[in-house]
Amino acid sequence: MTQGDVTCTPTAPKAQQALSLLLLRANHIVSISALVDELWADNPPASAVITAQSYIYQIRRCIHPKEKKSRIRSQFTQQADTEDGVTLLTRSPGYILLKREGQLDLDDFTRLAGEGRALLDRGDTQAAAVLLRQAMSLWRGSSPLSGVRCGPLLHAHLTVLSEEWMRVLALRIQADMALGRHHDLVGELRSLVAAHPLNEWLHGRLITALYAVGRRGEALEACLSLSDTLRRELGVDLSLELRQLQHQILIGQPPTPGTPGAPPLTHAS
């Protein structure tokens, strides 16, 4: 932040909520009815439209101050100001927040994830791991809307973002395992399976990482624990891939390509 800049973020929770929706739908019109739905769901007050307009006014004052240049700071933004092209306009039947590509952390997350995925597909695992880790580092807190009250529309956006985060996480873990970083992954994977107890993909990577670092007994215990959880919670057995992995561990055979967490097939150069 250069001298003379003023950091400005709306303080009212619902104003922050409205700003979040505008940011996630940047360059698209957000109708006043959509804002009302987000802010009050099925129970809007009689003054909902006027109140929503007052929140827009607060946001506009942050983006377009009369005297000093101001920057929006949010879970999404690196730096965004009117000089950089961020502007909030009234457009029937609501409002549109205009921005350039790359002004949100979410833009960089998507770009880095895409580049990392492409490198991984080409077999450049080392470079892919670096970019995928950079993408993940942009995700701060438990969600990109940490501290923001979320209504139905923001919850829908969060569902999509969470799925994309999981896909990028899986790619990064895949790259790290291909690079032999099993020791580094064990602790992280234990935390992830605790948070996602029914995710067989994550369990498979934990089991393989434990086996790869010589903790065969713990790997088998992890197999049994997952099997018990799946039967108790869903009434299903381990997937075929995990049963094959369990068998390979029992007989002391290295995981073959195609089983969870196994080294990938060699890419053609």
Image (cartoon, rainbow, N blue to C red):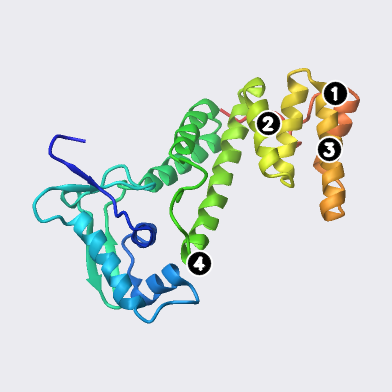
- The residue where tag 4 is placed is 152
- Real-space Cα distance between discs 3 and 4? 36 Å
Q: CA distance from mark 4 to mark 1?
A: 45 Å
Mark 3 or mark 2: which comes first in sequence?
A: 3
150 up-or-down from 248: above or below: below
Q: Is residue 155 above or below residue 3?
A: below
In this rendering, position of residue 95 left or right of residue 125: left
**Mark 1: secondary structure:** helix
Query: What residue is disc 1 on?
Result: 217
Quadrant holding the N terminus: top left
Q: Earlier in the sequence, mark 1 or mark 3?
A: 1
Query: If you read the primary sequence from the N terminus, does the residue marked by circle 2 or circle 1 appear first?
Result: 1
Task: Using the image, determine if residue 154 lies above or below residue 200.
Answer: below
- Whichever of callouts 4 and 1 sits on the residue coming sooner in the sequence is 4
Instruction: Identify residue for label 2.
Output: 265
Which one is in front, 5 or 208? 5
Tag shown at residue 12: none
Spatial separation of the CA atoms under disc 2 and disc 1: 27 Å
- Give the CA distance from mark 3 to mark 2: 29 Å
From the viewer's side, name the closer residue of 9 and 205.
9
Given the image, on which type of amino acid does mark 4 rest? Pro
Front position among marks 2 and 1 = 1
Rounded to the nearest angstrom, the CA distance separating label 1 from label 3 is 12 Å
Residue 260 appearing in the image: no
